[in-house]
Image: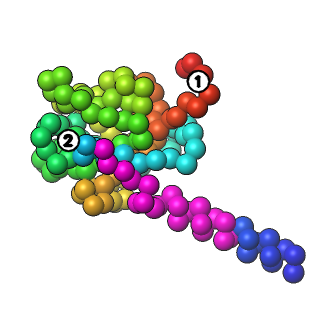
């Protein structure tokens, strides 16, 4: 009886955790830039998507969605970027991390190495999530709450 309750409790905990991971309710939008929050500090791992999302970073200041990826066939791919990311135009689009550093510019090739093409539709209503993202030698999302230097 005790073992059964433990298994059930573990199963319920896992189901709740997995449901939270797939939740789209963690998305926010600031000035049209879609971002997602992460429940804790994240460290990129060595897992890789079988069919990763790949595209060229594009941006337009007056667009409904100011920054996106453009697939090789020209299709517009919406992406939810890590919380704290912003976009600026100086004069072309620049994607900035949570510290304000430029990590990508309009025309840069971006690969979402841990995001499979079949995980989302790539639309504003169902964007790809840039999780486990490597840009400019850093892993994102990573919120350094302790102020450690890397």
Residue at the disc numbered 1: 147
Mark 2 surroundings: few (<14), some (14-19) or many (≥20) residues within 10 A: some
Quadrant assignment, res 13:
bottom right
Distance from disc 1 to disc 2, alpha carbons, whole Å, reads 30 Å
Q: Residue at x 24, y 57 (%)?
A: 123
Q: Is 24 on the left or on the right of 90, as rendered?
A: right
Mark 1 surroundings: few (<14), some (14-19) or many (≥20) residues within 10 A: few
Q: Residue at x 58, y 24 (%)?
A: 147
Magenta span of residues: 11-30
* Image x and y of residue 69, in percent: 23, 43
* Image x and y of residue 91, in percent: 14, 24
Residue 114 visible here: no
Q: What secondary structure is marked by label 1? A: loop
Tally of marks: 2
* Image x and y of residue 15, in percent: 60, 68
The extreme bottom residue here reads 1
Quadrant assignment, res 54:
top left
Quadrant showing the C terminus: top right
Magenta includes 19? yes
Q: Is 61 on the left or on the right of 14, as rendered?
A: left
Residue at the disc numbered 2: 66
Q: Residue at x 47, y 32 (%)?
A: 139
Of 119 and 125, which appears nearest the observer?
Answer: 125
Of 133 and 102, which appears nearest the observer?
Answer: 102
Q: Is residue 48 above or below residue 150?
A: below
Residue 74 visible here: yes
């Amino acid at each position: 009886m005790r073992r059964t309750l433990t298994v059930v409790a573990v199963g319920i905990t896992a189901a709740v955790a997995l449901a939270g991971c797939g939740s789209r309710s963690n998305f926010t939008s600031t000035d049209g830039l879609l971002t997602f929050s992460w429940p804790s500090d994240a460290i990129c791992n060595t897992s890789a998507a079988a069919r990763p999302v790949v595209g060229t970073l594009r941006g337009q200041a007056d667009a409904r969605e100011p920054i996106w990826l453009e697939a090789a066939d020209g299709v517009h791919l919406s992406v939810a970027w890590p919380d704290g990311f912003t976009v600026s135009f100086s004069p072309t689009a620049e994607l900035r991390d949570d510290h304000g550093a430029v990590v990508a510019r309009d025309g840069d090739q971006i690969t979402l190495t841990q995001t499979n093409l079949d995980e989302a539709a790539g639309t504003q209503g169902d964007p790809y999530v840039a999780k486990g993202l490597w840009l400019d030698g850093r892993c994102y999302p990573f919120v350094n709450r302790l102020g450690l230097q890397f």
